[in-house]
Amino acid sequence: MKDKDNIRERYLRDELPVRLGGLAANLARVQSFSNHPGHRDVIERLFDESKFFIEWSAPDAEPETQSELVELQIQLARWQYEWADIWDDPARRAAVAEQAGNWSRRVLEMSGLLG
């Protein structure tokens, strides 16, 4: 991630619900970008950025939300570790895309932005 300190500073200016909304948006991007063969590296960067978003947001969240965010961060690390193999297997890539979409919706619910 380029210039992590500047991104962190800008990210932390927002309230927690907005930060979680940004994380949800990243996960939705993982879902949609998984269908395009040229987006492998973009998705890997989204994994990295999302893990940082969790690291920077979790301390401000309620304990239940923290627990779910840690679970998501572990899942992102697992996907990232196996990404080369996942990317080459259309069924596994589709499964990750679906799970990322589910996580996106869950994080958006946790954010409270849905109202």
Image (cartoon, grey):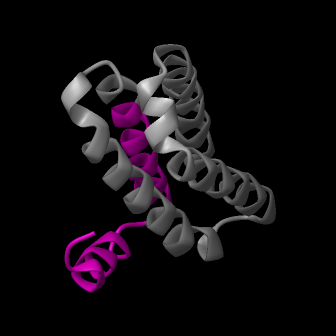
Q: Residue at x 30, y 28 (%)?
A: 33
Above or below 84: residue 52: below
Task: Please indicate whether residue 27 sits to the left or right of residue 72 in the image.
Answer: left
Residue 2 belongs to magenta span: yes
Residue interval drawn in magenta: 1-30
Q: Looking at this view, is 19 or 112 the one in front?
A: 19
Examine the image and state in which quarter residue 102 appears.
top right
Q: Is residue 113 visible?
A: no
Viewport quadrant of the N terminus: bottom left
Q: Looking at this view, is 45 or 63 the one in front?
A: 45
Q: Position of residue 3 (x, y in %)?
A: 20, 79
Residue 78 belongs to magenta span: no
Above or below 68: residue 66: below
Q: Residue at x 43, y 47 (%)?
A: 21
Q: Position of residue 32 (x, y in %)?
A: 33, 24
* The residue positioned farthest toward the top in the image shown: 91
Q: Looking at this view, is 79 or 69 the one in front?
A: 79
